[in-house]
């Protein structure tokens, strides 16, 4: 346990505003950027033949003006994980595209910065670089990846920003100076540079180290049994690849090639619904009636970890998907030809349980655990940290002074932080934790609390450690923040406290002699 004793000033804030947030911690990055640009891809990613082994590299949508560079993708990584690029500092790109979940979201619809829900499920990003059409979103409204990465930032539900505000937020963080300089030659922040860096990072998310890739390297063409597969997995691969006349289901007609990621047309109507007025898909982008109910065909790489499925996340499991394709395809006017019988009706594959199990087993071979765990794609910001409202000090509604001089100490251990303050003018305010009747007494209960350390926020469950001690008009308190469910120690912050650093503590307060409750913050500045 480490004890720091300094004079502190406690500032009572009568409210919060979006204009003043505690800045989060700086990212932790390697001294030399990770390798994003010179990845050695397997040979089968370059093969155009035999039939079925369509070249993955030949489908690369990287524009000539924005090749992947190591410093560019490294900058993109930081931008991708930075929640300060949302209006209230709570949402980053990674909030809806989690690495462990194939850069997708486990929620059916993603939650935006203000609690609203997105209109569609968040698609996984694996192998976005090799989507041949080069268009993005389920309805392909983004012509390029460089366009796409800027749209969630400006979306009123997702991140709520404007592009000038994005630039302003980036310019406020000193660590970006070196990152932009390394990527682009100087520290100037522009929308174009930000877009290019994010696109480079996303294009570097290439899945090529799955068990499928390992087995593919052992054979001459993808139609052969893979030596590292079980008989069930090889059966699933055959059912996936071979067209119905040859005894399979022809899934590869839409999820083609060695990356299982698209088809020549780019989008398709797979017969989810007869009536698609609830979401017209690509039609909303093109206005072409032939595009009603069509959606982009996603990659099946890491499909086992990207549930739920489809543009609206309607299917919770892979078995549900296959059940739909087995007997549930609907007769939409724009239904894809490959899903129609010779007579034009929706095909019924009538899969057996054994066939469904084999396909699911094959889908699991497409999981690339290396991509899902590689540190160079992970969150560079210290875990457990975030942001909170930390407004300037103002007088509270009773007219008591906002700034209260006090002395005290911070006691930090691996699992909790305790704030101990003395010389508090007890006649000016009382504090409570769990409710208006539970004022300072020994462990009266608890409440959720946040402690911003050096700008970063540690969240946990707070409780009173000691009673409010009164001596005349002077009080002393101790408030402990138990860091439950926070996966890091606070030890790194014990040595980072310096003169002038401000810690912000968020809890509940009550005015002396009053019954009204309001949420306030305490700002602790070390002198």
Image (cartoon, helix red, strand yellow):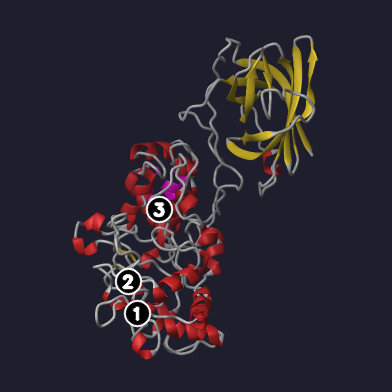
Residue 307 at what x, y percent from top left?
49, 63
> Which of the two discs, 3 and 2, labels the residue nearer the N terminus?
2
Q: Secondary structure at mark 2?
A: helix
Which image quarter holds the N terminus?
top right
Residue 196 at what x, y percent from top left?
36, 53
The residue singled out by tag 1 in the image is 54
Residue 145 at what x, y percent from top left?
33, 57
Local packing at callout 1 (Cα closer than 10 Å; few below 14, some 14-19, many 20+) is many
Instruction: Specify the label residue 59 is tagged with.
Output: 2
The answer for how far apart the CA atoms under marks 3 and 2 are is: 20 Å
The span picked out in magenta is 177-188
Determine whether, in the image, residue 475 is placed left or right of residue 393.
Answer: right
> Which of the two discs, 3 and 1, labels the residue nearer the N terminus?
1
What secondary structure is the stretch in magenta mostly built from?
Answer: helix
The residue singled out by tag 3 in the image is 198
Name the one closer to the observer, 420 or 239. Answer: 239
* Magenta segment includes 204: no
Determine whether, in the image, residue 41 is placed left or right of residue 484.
Answer: left
The answer for how far apart the CA atoms under marks 1 and 2 are is: 9 Å
Residue 291 at what x, y percent from top left?
23, 63
Local packing at callout 2 (Cα closer than 10 Å; few below 14, some 14-19, many 20+) is some
Local packing at callout 3 (Cα closer than 10 Å; few below 14, some 14-19, many 20+) is many
Residue contact at pointers 1 and 2, CB within 8 angstroms? yes
Instruction: Specify the label residue 291 is tagged with.
Output: none
Residue contact at pointers 3 and 1, CB within 8 angstroms? no
Q: Residue at x 66, y 12 (%)?
A: 513
Name the one closer to the observer, 387 or 460. Answer: 460
Determine whether, in the image, residue 137 is placed left or right of residue 471.
Answer: left
Does residue 189 appear anywhere in the picture? yes
């Amino acid at each position: 346990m480490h004890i720091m004793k300094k004079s502190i000033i406690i500032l009572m804030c009568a409210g919060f505003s979006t204009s003043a947030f505690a800045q989060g911690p700086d990212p932790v990055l390697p001294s030399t950027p990770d390798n994003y640009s010179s990845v050695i891809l397997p040979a089968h990613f370059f093969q155009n033949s035999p039939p079925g082994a369509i070249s993955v590299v030949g489908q690369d949508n990287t524009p000539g003006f924005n090749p992947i560079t190591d410093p560019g993708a490294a900058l993109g990584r930081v931008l991708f994980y930075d929640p300060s690029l949302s209006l209230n500092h709570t949402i980053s790109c990674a909030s809806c595209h989690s690495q462990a979940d194939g850069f997708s979201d486990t929620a059916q619809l993603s939650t935006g910065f203000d609690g609203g829900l997105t209109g569609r499920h968040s698609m996984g990003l694996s192998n976005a670089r090799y989507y041949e059409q080069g268009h993005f979103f389920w309805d392909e409204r983004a012509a390029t990846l460089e366009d796409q990465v800027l749209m969630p930032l400006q979306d009123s539900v997702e991140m709520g920003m404007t592009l000038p505000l994005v630039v302003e937020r980036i310019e406020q963080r000193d660590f970006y100076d070196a990152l932009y300089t390394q990527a682009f030659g100087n520290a100037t922040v522009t929308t174009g540079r930000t877009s290019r860096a994010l696109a480079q990072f996303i294009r570097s998310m290439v899945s090529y180290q799955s068990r499928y890739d390992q087995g593919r390297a052992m054979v001459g063409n993808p139609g052969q049994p893979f030596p590292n597969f079980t008989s069930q997995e090889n059966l699933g691969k055959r059912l996936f690849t071979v067209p119905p006349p040859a005894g399979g289901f022809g899934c590869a007609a839409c999820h083609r090639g060695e990356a299982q990621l698209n088809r020549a047309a780019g989008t398709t109507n797979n017969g989810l619904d007869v009536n698609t007025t609830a979401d017209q898909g690509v039609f909303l982008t093109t206005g072409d009636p032939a595009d009603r109910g069509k959606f982009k065909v996603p990659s099946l790489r890491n499909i086992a970890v990207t549930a739920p499925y489809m543009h609206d996340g309607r299917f919770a499991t892979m078995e549900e998907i296959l059940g739909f394709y087995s007997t549930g395809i609907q007769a939409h006017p724009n239904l894809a030809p490959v899903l129609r019988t010779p007579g034009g009706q929706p095909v019924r594959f009538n899969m057996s349980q054994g066939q469904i199990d084999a396909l699911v087993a094959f889908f699991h071979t497409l999981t690339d655990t290396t991509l899902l765990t590689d540190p160079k794609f992970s969150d560079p910001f210290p875990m457990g940290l975030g942001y909170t409202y930390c407004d300037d000090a103002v007088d509270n509604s009773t007219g008591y002074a906002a700034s209260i001089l006090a002395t005290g100490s911070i006691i930090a251990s691996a699992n909790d932080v305790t704030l101990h303050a003395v010389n508090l003018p007890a006649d000016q305010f009382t504090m409570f934790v769990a409710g208006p009747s539970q004022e300072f007494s020994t462990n009266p209960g608890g409440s959720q609390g946040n402690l911003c350390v050096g700008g970063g926020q540690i969240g946990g469950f707070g409780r009173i450690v000691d009673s409010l001690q009164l001596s005349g008009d002077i009080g002393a308190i101790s408030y402990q923040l138990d860091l439950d469910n926070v996966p890091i120690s606070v030890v790194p912050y014990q040595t980072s406290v310096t003169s002038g650093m401000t810690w912000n503590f968020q809890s509940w307060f009550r005015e002396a002699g009053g019954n009204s409750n309001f949420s306030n913050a305490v700002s602790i500045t070390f002198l």
